[in-house]
Image (cartoon, rainbow, N blue to C red):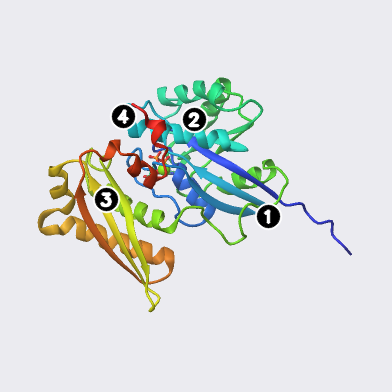
Amino acid sequence: MNATPVPTRCGLVALIGEPNAGKSTLMNRMVGAKVSIVTHKVQTTRARVRGIAVEGAAQLVFIDTPGLFRPRRRLDRAMVSAAWGGATDADVVVLLIEAHRGLTDGVRTILESMATQIPPGRTVALAINKIDRLPAERLLALSAEANAAYPFAATFMISAMRGHGVEDLRRWLAGQVPEGPWLYPEDQIADVALRQIAAEMTREKLTLRLHQELPYELTVETEAWEDRPDGSAKIDQVIYVARDGHKGITLGPKGETIKAVGQASRAEIAAFLGREVHLFLTVKVRPGWLDEAERYRAIGLDFRDGEP
Ligand SMILES: Nc1nc2c(ncn2[C@@H]2O[C@H](COP(=O)(O)OP(=O)(O)OP(=O)(O)O)[C@@H](O)[C@H]2O)c(=O)[nH]1
Ligand SMILES: [Mg+2]
């Protein structure tokens, strides 16, 4: 008996939403590995990150994007522009909103912009995330309210953190992406350079440990990567901070902060690579980095998009 072969499908799925909506958490869960960093703070993701998942005969190429918000500074503008760019490229767009926050002013602004930013005919779904934070009886009202504001093709109630509803969403997405050959080899889970992932992991640990504005005003770059004959990797990274005073805070008393950050990041990079890692961090004061094209390129952002 010959079964009719199921045609392969493949498409880009952009995850958009306000900062902190849970886009990166959802993409990591879809992929089954941490390819995009996550923190409890807003504006964690700075550039588009592609994570790849397979559902049956479909390859889903997720585009995690920076949060959409009203940009004030050059870096903000480049981030928001990268996010809309992700939505424009995609076959399917999923807007994430937070269940317990509902239709905030920020979400309403996004809904208004979607009318002009997303090409007509594009499939757009709504994912109400963090349903673990809202009583079930209030979810239906929120769903109705959101669907009255925008003609979503489908609505999903999910908890990206706990996994509820994520399978349903993935199956639905697999049916939405067009028929066609897979873009990536079967076992590839991300389309980001390893040195970039390694830099992001260090930035995540810094963001978790440092307070207030500092995480925004720093950037991490992998400067050198040496694969050693014993199978280990030696990775040198630079943390650029914008002000003198920030260097001391980043190092911490007796260098304790940078040491803890280095240990945590090293462990995570090693687990990701499945090999031993020697990580060396240097903090450099670079007052103008937020206006340097080279720093934006290293992050994966278009400098011109941040034009003042
Ligand atoms: N309670 C709860 N928290 C969640 C859920 N999904 C994500 N979070 C948390 O929300 C916070 C933000 O998650 P991220 O995935 O970094 O959000 P993001 O949308 O990528 O944020 P930006 O990159 O800043 O735009 C983290 O503390 C997550 O653990 C969820 O389903 N329930
Ligand atoms: Mg993110």
- Is there a contact, CB below 8 Å, between mark 4 and mark 2? no
**Of the residues shown, which amino acid type is indicated by label 2?**
Arg
Provide the residue designation for mark 3.
206
Residue 98 shows in this picture: no
Task: Give the mark nearer the N terminus: 1 vs 4.
Answer: 1
- Graded by Cα atoms within 10 Å as few (under 14), some (14 to 19) or many (20 or more), the crowding at tag 2 reads few
Task: Give the mark nearer the N terminus: 1 vs 2.
Answer: 1
Q: Secondary structure at mark 3?
A: helix
The quadrant the C terminus occupies is: top left
**Of the residues shown, which amino acid type is indicated by label 4?**
Arg
Residue 90 numbered mark, or none? none
Asked whether, in this view, residue 273 is left or right of residue 149, the answer is left
**Of the residues shown, which amino acid type is indicated by label 3?**
Leu
The answer for how far apart the CA atoms under marks 1 and 2 are is 33 Å
Asked whether, in this view, residue 57 is left or right of residue 20, the answer is right
Q: Which one is closest to the eye, mark 1 or mark 3?
A: 3
Residue 138 numbered mark, or none? 2
Judging depth in this view, the residue of 228 and 278 nearest the camera is 228
The answer for how far apart the CA atoms under marks 3 and 2 are is 37 Å
Provide the residue designation for mark 4.
73
Task: Give the mark nearer the N terminus: 4 vs 3.
Answer: 4
